Amino acid sequence: MATLTTTTTIQGRVNGQSINITMVGTVSNVDYYLNRSGKLNEGMAMQSLNESTPLPPTITNADIVYLRADSYIGAAQGPIDLVITTTGSASNGNFRLEPGQWAEFGRAEAGGIFADGASATASTLENVLTIEQGQSGAMPASLGLLVVFKPLS
Amino acid sequence: MSTFTIKSTAAIDGVSVCTNAQGLDVVSVMDYSKEVGATYSRLSTGSQQPTGLAQVFIQNTGTETALIRLTDEGTTVYNFTALAPGCHMCCPIQTGTIYFTDTAARAETGTTTLRIVALYI
C-alpha cells in the first residue's frame, strides 16, 4: 500500500505583514492511482473513469478517496471546465478552473465523494461515475487529473 | 493589494506526480481555526468582506471527517465534498460561470477542528 502526500504553500505579504502558510496532508492505504494529463484544443474534452463505457482503468474492488483536477498555466492557455457526475447521475458538478487553479475533493467516511443540490442541508455524498475535463473559451487548455483509490472496506 | 504565490504538490510514496502554482492579487487574508459539530457552520462568506470572492483552503486538524459545502452567489447551487482527518483541500472558485461565495462545514460524526485560510481577491 502506498501513501499520498499533498503539500500546499501560501506565501505573500499584505499590509506590511508577511504570510507563510504550509499545509501537509496524507492519505494512507492507497492501492491505485490514475495520473492523467492532456492538452485540449478548442472544442475538445477528455473523459475518465466512465463506468458506462469501459475506459481503463475499470476497478471493482476500490473506490476513489481523493480527486484533484489541475488547470496549468502556459502560453495562450485558457480555462478548463471540470464536470463530475455521480452514479445514477444523481449529482452533476460543474467547475471552471482558470490556468494555475486546481480543485480537490475527498471521500466521506460513510462513502461517496461528491453531491450537489438545491438544499443547504443535503450531504449524502455519492460515488463518481464520470470525470470530464473540457476546454473552455477560444484557447487551448492544459490540464491534469489525479484520482487516488483505496480498497473497499 | 499584493501578489501571493500558492504552490501545491501531490506525491505517491515520495515521488511527485502533480505540481501546480498560481499567483493571486490578494487584498486580505483570513487564517483561523474552528471546531464544527453536527450542523453546517459557515467558514467564509463573501458578504461584508473586502471583496466578495476568496480562494479558500481548508485543513482538517481534528479527528473526524468533515463535510464541506460550497454555495454559489445566487444561493441556488450547493456542492458537497468531504475532508478526512489529516487532509487539506483547495476549494474551487467557480461553478460554471457563477462564483462560490460561501463555504461551510460540519463534522460527519461528532466534532472536528478545521483550519481555514481564505485569500480575498
Image (spheres, coloured by chain):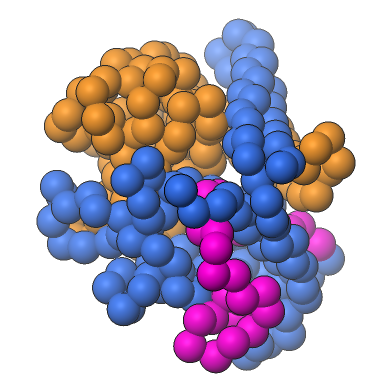
Residue drawn where x is 49% and y is 75% of the image: A130
Looking at the image, which is closer to me, B113 or A56? Answer: A56
Residue drawn where x is 41% and y is 54% of the image: A113
Residue drawn where x is 60% and y is 9% of the image: A17
The blue one among the chains is A
Span of residues in magenta: A45-74
Residue A125 rendering spot, x and y as whole percentages: 31, 55
Looking at the image, which is closer to me, A46 or B24? Answer: A46
Looking at the image, which is closer to me, B53 or B65? Answer: B65
Residue B30 rendering spot, x and y as whole percentages: 43, 20
Quadrant hosting residue B95: bottom left
Position of A78 compared to A89: left or right? right
- How many labels sit on residues? 0
- Residue B58 shows in this picture: yes
Looking at the image, is B58 positioned above or below residue A69? above
Q: Is residue A47 magenta?
A: yes
Looking at the image, is A127 positioned above or below residue B6? below
Most extreme residue toward the top, as rendered?
Answer: A17
Residue drawn where x is 33% and y is 21% of the image: B112
Residue A63 rendering spot, x and y as whole percentages: 51, 58
Residue A70 rendering spot, x and y as whole percentages: 66, 57
The orange one among the chains is B
Q: Quadrant of the N terminus of chain B?
A: top right
Quadrant hosting residue B44: top left
- Residue B96 shows in this picture: no
